[in-house]
Amino acid sequence: MKARVTVTLKSGVLDPQGKAIEGALRSLGVDGVASVRQGKVFDVEIDGADKAKAEALLKEAADKLLANTVIENYRVEVLG
Protein backbone atom coordinates (compact mmCIF):
# COMPACT_ATOMS: atom_id res chain seq x y z
CA MET A 1 0.00 0.00 0.00
CA LYS A 2 1.29 3.46 -0.84
CA ALA A 3 0.95 6.51 1.35
CA ARG A 4 2.18 10.08 1.53
CA VAL A 5 3.07 12.22 4.53
CA THR A 6 3.24 15.96 3.80
CA VAL A 7 4.98 18.12 6.39
CA THR A 8 4.65 21.92 6.37
CA LEU A 9 5.59 24.70 8.74
CA LYS A 10 2.80 25.99 10.96
CA SER A 11 1.45 29.41 10.02
CA GLY A 12 3.32 32.12 11.88
CA VAL A 13 6.61 30.18 11.84
CA LEU A 14 9.32 32.04 9.93
CA ASP A 15 10.27 30.27 6.67
CA PRO A 16 13.66 31.61 5.48
CA GLN A 17 13.99 28.91 2.82
CA GLY A 18 10.58 29.83 1.41
CA LYS A 19 11.61 33.51 1.34
CA ALA A 20 14.86 32.60 -0.48
CA ILE A 21 12.90 30.61 -3.07
CA GLU A 22 10.47 33.51 -3.46
CA GLY A 23 13.36 35.92 -4.10
CA ALA A 24 15.02 33.52 -6.55
CA LEU A 25 11.80 33.16 -8.52
CA ARG A 26 11.50 36.95 -8.79
CA SER A 27 15.12 37.25 -9.94
CA LEU A 28 14.42 34.61 -12.59
CA GLY A 29 11.54 36.70 -13.91
CA VAL A 30 8.72 34.50 -12.63
CA ASP A 31 5.90 36.99 -12.10
CA GLY A 32 2.83 36.69 -9.92
CA VAL A 33 4.29 34.71 -7.01
CA ALA A 34 2.95 36.32 -3.84
CA SER A 35 4.74 34.08 -1.33
CA VAL A 36 6.39 30.66 -0.99
CA ARG A 37 6.30 28.23 1.95
CA GLN A 38 8.46 25.13 1.69
CA GLY A 39 7.82 21.70 3.14
CA LYS A 40 8.69 18.01 2.91
CA VAL A 41 6.93 15.06 1.26
CA PHE A 42 7.54 11.44 2.25
CA ASP A 43 6.25 8.71 -0.07
CA VAL A 44 6.04 5.49 1.93
CA GLU A 45 5.15 1.92 0.99
CA ILE A 46 3.43 -0.06 3.75
CA ASP A 47 2.99 -3.83 3.98
CA GLY A 48 -0.62 -4.94 4.38
CA ALA A 49 -4.01 -3.76 3.18
CA ASP A 50 -5.57 -2.19 6.29
CA LYS A 51 -5.85 1.55 5.60
CA ALA A 52 -6.69 2.43 9.20
CA LYS A 53 -3.60 0.61 10.50
CA ALA A 54 -1.43 2.24 7.83
CA GLU A 55 -2.72 5.69 8.74
CA ALA A 56 -2.14 5.07 12.46
CA LEU A 57 1.39 3.79 11.76
CA LEU A 58 2.26 6.85 9.68
CA LYS A 59 0.81 9.27 12.24
CA GLU A 60 3.03 7.64 14.85
CA ALA A 61 6.04 7.92 12.52
CA ALA A 62 5.29 11.58 11.86
CA ASP A 63 4.88 12.35 15.56
CA LYS A 64 8.13 10.58 16.47
CA LEU A 65 10.42 11.36 13.53
CA LEU A 66 9.10 12.86 10.30
CA ALA A 67 7.76 16.14 11.73
CA ASN A 68 8.80 18.51 14.47
CA THR A 69 5.29 18.98 15.83
CA VAL A 70 6.28 22.11 17.75
CA ILE A 71 6.72 24.05 14.50
CA GLU A 72 5.32 21.74 11.80
CA ASN A 73 1.97 20.28 10.80
CA TYR A 74 1.60 17.06 8.84
CA ARG A 75 -1.02 15.37 6.70
CA VAL A 76 -1.21 11.61 6.10
CA GLU A 77 -2.79 10.30 2.90
CA VAL A 78 -3.18 6.56 2.33
CA LEU A 79 -3.24 6.23 -1.45
CA GLY A 80 -4.08 2.55 -1.69
Image (cartoon, rainbow, N blue to C red):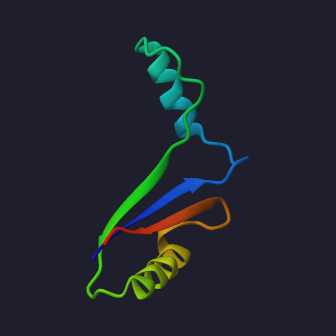
Q: Quadrant of residue 58?
A: bottom left
Q: Residue 11 at what x, y percent from top left? A: 69, 48
Q: In the rendered view, does 51 fall on the left or right side of 46?
A: right
Q: In the rendered view, does 46 fall on the left or right side of 17?
A: left
Q: Quadrant of residue 41?
A: bottom left
Residue lying furthest top in this view? 29
The residue that appears at 52% across and 39% down in the rendered structure is 17
Count of number-bearing discs? 0
Q: Residue 21 at what x, y percent from top left? A: 48, 30
Residue lying furthest right in this view? 12
Q: Residue 75 at what x, y percent from top left? A: 52, 64
Q: In the rendered view, does 32 fall on the left or right side of 42?
A: right
In the image, residue 39 above or below residue 75:
above
Q: Residue 66 at what x, y percent from top left? A: 47, 69
Q: In the rendered view, does 36 fall on the left or right side of 55?
A: right
The residue that appears at 27% across and 88% down in the rendered structure is 48
The residue that appears at 42% across and 88% down in the rendered structure is 53
Q: Quadrant of the C terminus?
A: bottom left
Q: Quadrant of the N terminus?
A: bottom left
In the image, residue 65 above or below residue 73:
below
